[in-house]
Image (spheres, grey):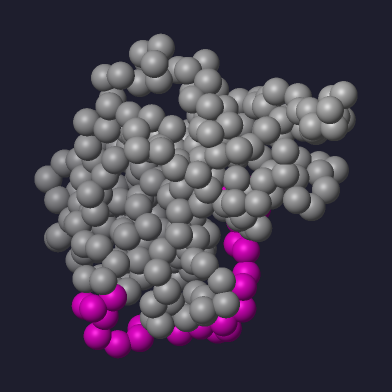
Amino acid sequence: MSVEFHFEKLILGGSLESLLYAFVHEIPIVISNPIVPFELETMDYDGDFKFLGYDHAREIYKSEMWDRLSFILSMAGLIMLPNTIKNMRQEDKKLVFATQGNSRTTINYKTLITFDKESDEFLHVYDWAYIRSGSKILRPKISDLEDFVKDVYFYQSKRPGMKPGVKDLVTYSKINTLEINDYEKSVSFWRLKTINMMKEQGLRGTANGYNKKGAPLYYAIKLEHTHREIIKEYAPKFDFKKILAKRKDKGNTWNLATKLFHHRRISISQESSQLQVKV
């Protein structure tokens, strides 16, 4: 089966900025490579974000906004071929896609806006772990000057049966692409560095009674690495300020979003933005 579309303008992107640009200008977008932001990354509040249900009551998480924008763009019919692209090739003024079910889709355009320029130099690496043995953690984050395990974020554990106050963690590292498979950037080295950072900040393992002199004893800190998330570095065509500054009026997508969200805090996806209570 073959399907063909014709548009004056078409966006090729996958970042939060590309979704916001598509929303503001009401231009169809092809998300060939979704660039979903890190779940704990926040952004400054802007009055224009009220259309997505945000206010000053809490921080705005970029991953949650990515979910909301992709949802409203889908509702408006502006996301082309969601979750069905197998491969893509670019020809003269057209994009040709092979989609699931061995179908072919051709999108013709007069202007193509390629939004996200990826860099092959660095990778943004997030290592997620359960804290199997750890003392009570009150701070949301600890940091280091080095790029490897630069930040350690603590968040309310989402494991089944966990009591309030039990934390797990995720670390952020900026790693040269050529070094990603080096031992010094491995999970084993990550564990040593992360535990050392926690100890330097006075954190300990689970309490284990007292010694003969009455001093508290602790088990060693124990971390269970669950997975590593790697996001390529990219440069968007326009940043948030430039995108919002170019908005001339509130179009159909803006009105649709306002009706749907009505300034309420709504979670669109249970799979994305997993940490609804972030820290």
Q: Quadrant of the C terminus?
A: bottom right
Which corner quadrant of the image does residue 173 belong to?
top left
Which corner quadrant of the image does residue 181 belong to?
top left
In the image, residue 54 lies in the stretch drawn in magenta? no
In this view, the residue in front, 29 or 41, is 41
Q: Position of residue 157 (x, y in %)?
A: 71, 45
In this view, the residue in front, 239 or 153, is 153
Q: Examine the rendered structure and indicate whether residue 209 appears above or below residue 35.
A: above
At horizontal 15% and vertical 60% (from top left) the residue drawn is 111
Magenta stretch, residue numbers: 244-272
Residue farthest to the front?
213
Which corner quadrant of the image does residue 206 belong to?
top right
At horizontal 26% and vertical 19% (from top left) the residue drawn is 178
Q: Examine the rendered structure and indicate whether residue 167 appears above or below residue 178.
A: below
At horizontal 72% and vertical 38% (from top left) the residue drawn is 135
Q: Is residue 248 left or right of residue 20?
A: left
At horizontal 35% and vertical 44% (from top left) the residue drawn is 32
Q: Position of residue 67 (x, y in %)?
A: 51, 58
Q: Examine the rendered structure and indicate whether residue 125 appears above or below residue 250.
A: above
Residue 139 shows in this picture? yes
Q: Is residue 228 left or right of residue 96?
A: right
In the image, residue 260 lies in the stretch drawn in magenta? yes
Residue farthest to the top?
183
